[in-house]
């Protein structure tokens, strides 16, 4: 009896075995294949669909500014006035010269009228007649020249009033009232008027990006033409991404393409126009033009956070059917928002870990669970710059 009690006491003193470690819980996503369009984003800036430079065409002191800077002005509105007095004096001088030339013409015409009948009866020599004719023709030429001088002086006087050539948004003046403006000083630049509805966006696209975009646009045109949508073949819509990341509500169309690739930058300049009825867009704003550049059938998409990179080698942690971990090397392609396009290394239906990657080891047994929304990056539009 005593021996049994002693055995029970000794067995109670043996150390307890620690419980097995809890299995690591790993969130995963199930890979699926889907058709995706890879957008091409190109960086540019907004410009007026028409930019008209306002310059002083005569030299003089700026006499007045007749508009509010940074606002819309109507076609024909008075913008600037230059001191007209020197030009008014030129007009008066030219008109006086014209009056003098006209007086000389009247005298020369009278002399010719008097000499011509006398020459017909040989009362005066032919030399006198020739001189009278020459004086009359010269007087007529002087009158025409004087009229041209008056017209030129009046044109220059008209240049002292500078009017808006078209309706548009006008910027800040390059000169103030009282400044001497001259074409020899900055070409007489005073301001710029931009037509902002529609507004243009000028972008530079790489040669590779241009080829991708051109092929994609050609495919879209062919598809629309095949469907009988002839009216919209040349109206393929583009999207505009603003500086705050929002997508502009209006769609645009390409309007101009430069003749050649710039050999110094390897880029091609393209312009597109977007409606701007509310005047939200102004020239000089940062913008991204986006359109579908390529389409991939059955693409494998994977969140970027599920892909780790080591020495330019990309790998993922695949959770096999027996819940063990396999390290898999993958080939990534283009980036689509917060996802990578996986070109090789994964198959649809496989489970890939999206968190806890630093704790995972090959052949480790884990407790997988589907990742919830908080563990996945927000869906964001994006693309690969051309």
Image: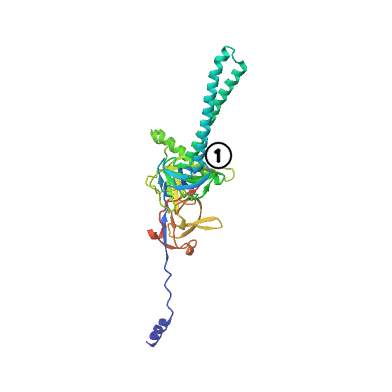
- What is the x, y in percent for residue 128? 60, 18
73 or 367: nearer the eye?
A: 73
Residue 14's place in the image compared with 313, above or below, is below
- What is the x, y in percent for residue 274? 42, 43
Is the image coloured rainbow, by chain, by secondary structure, or in one colour? Answer: rainbow
Dot 1: few (<14), some (14–19), or many (≥20) neighbours within 10 Å? few
- What is the x, y in percent for residue 229? 38, 34
Residue sitting at the far bottom: 2
Q: Is residue 292 left or right of residue 128?
A: left
Residue sitting at the far front: 123
The reply to whether residue 136 is in sight is yes
Q: Is residue 256 left or right of residue 231?
A: right
66 or 288: nearer the eye?
A: 66
Residue 282's place in the image compared with 113, above or below, is below
Q: What's the residue at 40%, 84% (across, down)? A: 9
Corner quadrant of residue 312: bottom right
* Residue named by callout 1: 260
Label 1 secondary element: loop
The reply to whether residue 41 is in sight is no
């Amino acid at each position: 009896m005593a021996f049994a009690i002693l055995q029970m006491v000794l067995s109670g003193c043996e150390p307890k075995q620690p419980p097995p470690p809890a299995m690591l819980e790993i969130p995963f996503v199930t890979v699926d294949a889907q058709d995706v369009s890879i957008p091409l984003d190109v960086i540019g800036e907004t410009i007026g669909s028409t930019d008209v430079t306002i310059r002083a065409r005569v030299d003089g002191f700026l006499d007045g500014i007749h508009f509010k800077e940074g606002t819309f002005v109507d076609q024909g509105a008075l913008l600037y006035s230059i001191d007209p007095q020197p030009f008014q004096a030129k007009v008066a001088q030219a008109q006086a010269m014209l009056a003098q030339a006209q007086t000389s013409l009247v005298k020369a015409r009278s002399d010719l009228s008097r000499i011509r009948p006398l020459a017909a009866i040989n009362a005066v020599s032919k030399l006198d007649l020739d001189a009278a004719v020459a004086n009359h023709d010269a007087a007529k030429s002087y009158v025409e020249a004087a009229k041209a001088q008056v017209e030129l002086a009046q044109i220059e006087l008209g240049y002292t009033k500078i009017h808006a050539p078209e309706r548009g948004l006008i910027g800040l003046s390059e000169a103030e009232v009282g400044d001497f403006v001259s074409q020899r000083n900055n070409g007489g630049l005073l301001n710029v008027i931009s037509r902002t509805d529609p507004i243009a966006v000028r972008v530079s696209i790489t040669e590779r990006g241009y080829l991708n975009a051109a092929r994609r646009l050609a495919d879209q045109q062919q598809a629309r033409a095949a469907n009988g949508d002839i009216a919209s073949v040349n109206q393929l819509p583009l999207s505009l991404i603003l500086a705050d990341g929002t997508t502009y509500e209006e769609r645009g169309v390409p309007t101009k393409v430069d003749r050649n690739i710039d050999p110094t930058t390897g880029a091609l300049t393209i312009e597109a126009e977007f409606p701007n009825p509310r005047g939200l867009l102004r020239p000089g704003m940062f913008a991204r033009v986006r359109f579908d550049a390529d389409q991939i059938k059955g693409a494998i998409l994977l969140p970027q956070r599920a892909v780790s990179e080591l020495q330019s080698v990309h790998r993922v942690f695949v959770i096999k059917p027996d819940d063990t971990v396999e390290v898999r090397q993958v080939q990534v392609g283009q980036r689509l928002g917060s996802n990578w396009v996986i070109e090789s290394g994964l198959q649809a239906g496989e489970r890939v870990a999206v968190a806890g990657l630093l704790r995972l080891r090959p052949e480790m047994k884990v407790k997988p669970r589907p990742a919830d929304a908080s563990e996945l990056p927000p869906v964001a539009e994006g693309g690969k710059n051309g």
